[in-house]
Image (spheres, rainbow, N blue to C red):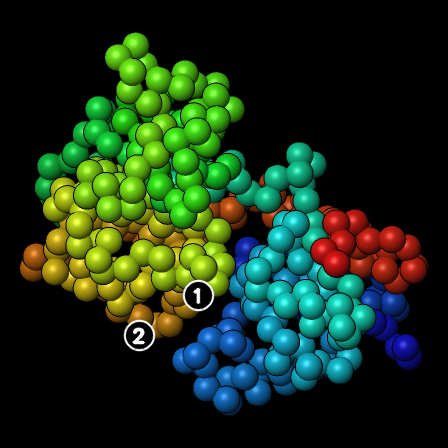
Amino acid sequence: MSGPIKVAVLDDYQGISEPKFRALDPTKFEVSFFKDTLRPYNHPDTPQEIKDKLVARLEPFAVISTMRERTPFPSELIARLPNLKLVLTTGNRNRGLDLDAFQARGIPVAGALGHHGSVGSVSTTEHTVAMVLAAARNIAQDDLSVKTGGWQTVPTVGLAGKVFGTVGLGRLGTAVAQIMKKAFGMRVVAWSENLTQERADEKAREAGLLVEDGEGNKTFKAVSKEELFRTADVVSVHVVLSDRSRGCIAARDLEMMKPTAIFVNTSRGPLVVEKDLLGVLEQGRIRAAALDVFDLEPLPLDSPWRTTKWGQDGRSRVLLTPHMGYVEEETLDEWYDVQVENLLRWEKGEELQVRLW
C-alpha cells in the first residue's frame, strides 16, 4: 500500500472522534470526516443516484469507521468497495453490517466496548424513562408555550398505579420496567413472542424484585399481545430488530390502545409499521407518542414527522428525539478510543479487540 492509509470516519455528528483520529501520524494515515449521513444503500426508497453517491464517497478508503447502524453496509454496497480492508464499528453488535459478506471478502470488522462493556444500555434506559415522563407531563409542549409567550397547555397525566406495558422483557425492557415499578408503583405487563410467566418471574428475580406481591399479583405479568395493547397506559418497545420482529407492531395493535395511552419507541423504527402509527396519531386515537427511532434515519426534511402541528386539530401529541438513546459523551468517547487503538493494531498486524467475525 503506497502512501498514507486512507481512513473515512462516518456519521460522528458531535465531532468526538476528530481529535483522536487527527492525532494519528499523518505520514501513515490520511483521515477524512463525513458528518452528513446519506440515505441507506439498501432502503427501498433510496434512488440509484444516491447509491452511486455513497459508493463514490466510500470507494477510495481502505478503512472505514462507522457509528452504530447509521450507515448500513449490505452485501451489494460491500461488493462495490474494492479498496476496503478494515471496518471499525461501535458496540459489540451492528445489524447494519453484512458480516458474512465482509468475511467472504476477508475484511475484518472490529467493534468497540467501553470500560464497563456497555453498548449504551444504561443510557437508553434513562432516555426511555425521560421520554415517558416528558410525554406524560407535556414537557416539550409546555416549554414551547412558555418560550413563545403562552402559559399552561393541557393537563398532565399521572403514572402512579397505572399499567406499564413492555413489548420485550430482555435487558432493556426489564431495566425500564423495574424503574417504572419501583419509582412510580406502576403495574407491569409484558409480552414478546416467546415470553412465558416462568421467564417473566425469573426476570423479576434478576432485577431484585419479588416475583409477586402479598395478594398474589405478579410483579412482571406475562400477557398476550392483545391484552398488553388493550390494558397498558404506557406501551414501551424493547425488542431486537430481526426479520421476524420487523413490523411486529401494526394498526391492529395500536388501534386497541386506550385513548389516554402513551406509545414509546426507543428500540428500532422498523419494529413498527410507520404508516399505521402515523395514521393512529393523526387521528388522535391515543394521548401521545414519544419516539427516538424511525424507519428512515436521519429523517428526510419532508418527513411527515417533521411538523409542529402535533397536538393540534385532534392530532395526538408527539415527542421526537433524533436517536439519542445511546448518545452519551463518555460512551462515544470510549468507543472512538478503541476504534483508534484497533486501527493501530491492524496497521501493525496485531490482534483486534472485539472482532465481530
Amino acid type of the residue tagged 1 in the rendering = Glu
| Image quadrant where residue 156 sits | top left
Camera-side residue of 242 and 156? 242
Quarter of the figure with the N terminus: bottom right
Name the spot of residue 260 as percent of width and height, x first.
Answer: 14, 42
Task: Give the residue at mark 1.
Answer: 297
Residue at point 65%, 50% (across, down) = 92
Residue at point 26%, 41% (across, down) = 228
Camera-side residue of 274 and 88? 274
Check residue 346 in the rendering and tell me which mark sits there, or answer none.
none
Q: Tag 1, which secondary structure?
A: loop
Question: Please, which residue is most extreme toward the left here?
Answer: 313
Amino acid type of the residue tagged 2 in the rendering = Asp
Up/down of 86 relative to 123, above or below: below
One can see residue 144 in this view: no
Quarter of the figure with the C terminus: bottom right
Task: Give the residue at mark 2.
Answer: 302
Residue at point 28%, 59% (across, down) = 250
Up/down of 6 relative to 216, above or below: below
Say left or right for 333 vs 227.
Answer: right
Say left or right for 135 vs 191.
Answer: left
In the rendered structure, which disc, 2 or 1, sits on the residue that comes first in sequence?
1
Residue at point 57%, 64% (across, down) = 96
Name the spot of residue 194 as percent of width and height, x first.
Answer: 43, 44
Judged by depth in the image, the label closer to the viewer, 2 or 1, is 1
